[in-house]
Image (tube, coloured by chain):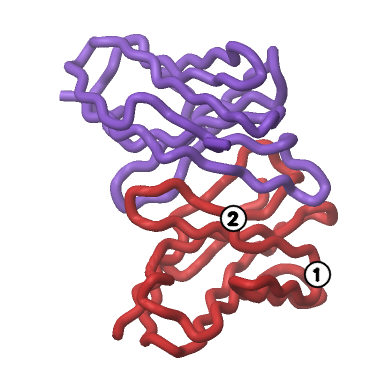
Chain colours: A purple, B red
């Protein structure tokens, strides 16, 4: 049971390049999330997927797209990378979105992205 | 949108009890209060969750007063390994899950 896995662990891009960050979970969770964390800052929600087939914008969606490929996988795409997107990206999953009580999120190890 | 306010940082020594308070004045009736811990270079991990009064697990205790406008995470007898950032969240009345900047706890020997 690997939990939440992310690939790659590190990536360096040049401005304007594109890339896709991959995330997979093996906990049969319905909801998945993408966050970014800038140095010394908290996490900011980029996009989330409440269930397979649905995606919604979070706090900071501009410059990103997502795909909920199936129940297990949720990818984040940067179409034209910018230096402002240099950050650590975390994927997370939970049984449900919110919930009663609020369902805890399980986080992956993160992807460190640098855009030059 | 349920917003939380926490101290930016706290210092402690090994063996002491640490209490981190979070303010959430506009908490909604069906919101729960959840705390996460994040070590450097790792994703956050769930510590504890509560709705009212007191919740205790093997890691921490969570105290929530009757008006629920604040909560206090209590870490008993901290060790160096408790050095981390602690986040307070309220939900699920919002689907824009806000972690905020958290409280950076530094434990000294």
B60 sits to left or right of A61:
right
* Corner quadrant of residue A6: top left
Q: Give the side of residue B74 with respect to residue A86, left or right.
A: right
Q: Residue at x 22, y 29 (%)?
A: A114
Is residue A99 shown above or below B19? above
Q: How many marks?
A: 2
Say which chain tag 1 marks: B
Of residues B67 and A17, the one drawn nearer to the viewer in this rendering: A17
Secondary structure under tag 2 reads: strand
Q: Residues within 10 Å of mark 2 (few under 14, many from 20)?
A: some
The quadrant of the image that shows the N terminus of chain A is: top right
Instruction: Determine whether, in the image, residue B18 is placed left or right of residue B28.
Output: left
Whether residue A15 is situated above or below residue B71 in the rendered picture: above
Q: Residues within 10 Å of mark 1 (few under 14, many from 20)?
A: some
Residue B102 screen position, x and y as percent = 46, 60
Q: Residue furthest front?
A: A1
| SS type, badge 1 | loop
Q: Which mark is residue B52?
A: 1
Residue A2 percent location from the top left of the image: 53, 36
Residues indicated by labels 2 and 1 sit on the same polypeptide chain: yes
Q: Which residue is mark 2?
A: B46
Between the C-alphas of marks 2 and 1, the distance is 18 Å
């Amino acid at each position: 049971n690997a939990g939440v896995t992310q690939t790659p662990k590190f990536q360096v891009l040049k401005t304007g390049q594109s890339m896709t960050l991959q995330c997979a979970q093996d906990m049969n969770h319905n909801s998945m999330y993408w966050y970014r964390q800038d140095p010394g800052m908290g996490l900011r929600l980029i996009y989330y997927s409440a269930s397979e087939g649905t995606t919604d914008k979070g706090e900071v969606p501009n410059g990103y797209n997502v795909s909920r490929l199936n129940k297990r996988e949720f990818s984040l795409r940067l179409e034209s990378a910018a230096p402002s997107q240099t950050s650590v990206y975390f994927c997370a999953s939970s049984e449900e979105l919110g919930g009663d009580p609020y369902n805890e999120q399980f986080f992956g190890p993160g992807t460190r992205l640098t855009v030059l | 949108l349920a917003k939380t306010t926490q101290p930016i940082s706290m210092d402690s020594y090994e063996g002491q009890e640490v209490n981190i308070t979070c303010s959430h004045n506009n908490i909604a009736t069906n919101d729960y209060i959840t705390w996460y811990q994040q070590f450097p270079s790792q994703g956050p991990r769930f510590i504890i969750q509560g709705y009212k009064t007191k919740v205790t697990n093997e890691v921490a205790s969570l105290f929530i007063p009757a008006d629920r406008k604040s909560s206090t995470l209590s870490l008993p007898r901290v060790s160096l390994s408790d050095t981390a950032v602690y986040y307070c969240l309220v939900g699920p009345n919002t689907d824009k899950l806000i972690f905020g900047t958290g409280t950076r706890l530094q434990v000294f020997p």
